[in-house]
Image: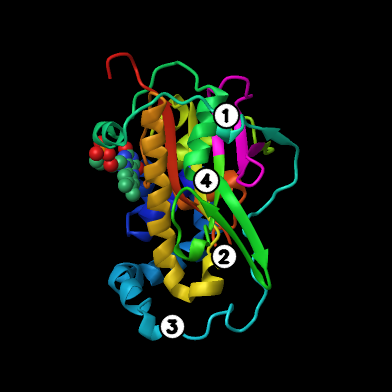
């Protein structure tokens, strides 16, 4: 979905008139008429769901209490979903995790100096530094498979160690890595370059509502969730855990960034439809949940 369509749907569904929609979505008369035809059904659906959306928070918390849970797919003996989604492609190995030179920084210092950083220097991240960040937040230190179970263990906690995430990277300025879109393999500790349109950075910038740091950072991590990996075990309650788990991931990105003289800023304000489209995700089986640009600090910051 492009930005114009998003803003058309948003303002239209919230009752704006023709002129207001055209102005807010920066639409010509012709574009407006085209969207009126092609998206009439979607506007109706959003409008129908608006009252439910307005109260979904408390309902979500209430209805994901244990008391509403039933028999999980795991208990029913349904096949365990894969612990890691592996797109095909050549693996670009990252510097080995046990050989990464990382400046000493005390835990106290890392925690106390952490801030959301939105302005970065032009200095690239080294591959070692990128490797360290991924080690901290996404790397799988162990993989176990047994009778109908597949599980990874990582440097961040996750409910039932389901780690229902995939980590994508928009590489802007990392030494010896061509800018573009990548996927991180947590078992092989390497990257796979994904095919993406040439203007992928601009699309991600639009998807993140013009928050410039996604393109000025050396790298922008994009965490996606694959809920069934957790739902298989915890049913609908898993959706609570997704967001809690993502927070652990984000904090390790933050602290690891401090250790390499960099800073991060978590991003939750993005247009789901656009970001999912950037990564080729369907929005249900897998969807973007968190975005984290990381770049070197400017001198004196
Ligand atoms: C879930 C979450 C979503 C956030 N989304 C954004 C965002 O979209 N844009 C942004 O600039 N900062 C975002 N932030 C950063 C917060 O604004 C920031 O943590 C807060 O202002 C406190 O500042 P500090 O991190 O420097 O302590 C987000 C933080 C969290 C935890």
Number of marks in the image?
4
Residue designated by label 4:
138
Q: CA distance from mark 3 to mark 1?
A: 45 Å
Residue designated by label 3:
69
Residue designated by label 1:
99
The picture places residue 269, in percent across and down from the top left corner, at 37, 46
Residue designated by label 2:
229
Residue 211's tag is none
Q: Which quadrant of the structure image shows residue 181?
A: top right
- View extreme (left): residue: 112
Mark 3 secondary-structure assignment: loop
- The label nearer to you, 4 versus 1, is 1
Say if mark 1 contacts mark 2, CB within 8 Å: no
Say if mark 4 contacts mark 1, CB within 8 Å: no
Q: Is residue 173 magenta?
A: yes
Q: Tell me the residue at 57%/65% (across/down).
A: 229
Q: Earlier in the sequence, mark 3 or mark 2?
A: 3
Q: CA distance from mark 4 to mark 3?
A: 29 Å
Q: CA distance from mark 4 to mark 1?
A: 17 Å
| Up-down relation of residue 68 to residue 121 (above or below) | below
- The label nearer to you, 2 versus 4, is 4
- The label nearer to you, 3 versus 1, is 1
């Amino acid at each position: 979905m492009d930005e114009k369509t998003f803003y058309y749907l948003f303002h239209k569904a919230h009752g704006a008139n023709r002129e207001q929609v055209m102005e807010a979505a920066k639409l010509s008369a012709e574009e407006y008429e085209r969207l009126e035809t092609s998206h009439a059904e979607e506007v109706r659906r959003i409008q129908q769901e608006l009252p439910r959306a307005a109260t979904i928070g408390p309902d979500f918390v209430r209805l994901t209490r244990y008391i509403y849970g039933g028999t999980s797919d795991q208990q029913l003996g349904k096949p365990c979903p894969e612990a890691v989604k592996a797109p095909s492609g050549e693996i670009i190995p990252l510097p080995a995790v046990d050989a990464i030179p990382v400046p000493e920084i005390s835990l106290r210092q890392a925690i106390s100096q952490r801030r959301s950083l939105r302005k970065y220097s032009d200095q690239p991240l080294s591959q070692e530094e990128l490797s360290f960040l991924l080690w901290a937040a996404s790397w799988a230190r162990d993989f176990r498979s047994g009778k109908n179970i597949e599980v990874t263990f990582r440097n961040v906690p996750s409910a039932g160690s389901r780690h229902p995430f995939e980590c994508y990277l928009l590489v802007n300025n990392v030494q010896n890595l061509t800018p573009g879109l990548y996927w991180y393999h947590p078992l092989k500790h390497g990257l796979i370059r994904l095919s993406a349109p040439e203007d992928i950075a601009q699309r991600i910038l639009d998807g993140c509502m013009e928050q410039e740091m996604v393109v000025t950072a050396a790298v922008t991590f994009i965490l996606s969730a694959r809920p069934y990996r957790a739902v298989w075990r915890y049913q609908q309650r898993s959706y609570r855990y997704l967001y809690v788990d993502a927070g652990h991931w984000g904090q390790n990105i933050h602290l690891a960034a401090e250790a390499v003289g960099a800073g991060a800023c978590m991003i939750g304000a993005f247009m789901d439809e656009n970001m999912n489209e950037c990564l080729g995700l369907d929005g249900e089986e897998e969807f973007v949940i968190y975005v984290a640009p990381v770049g070197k600090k400017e001198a004196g910051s």
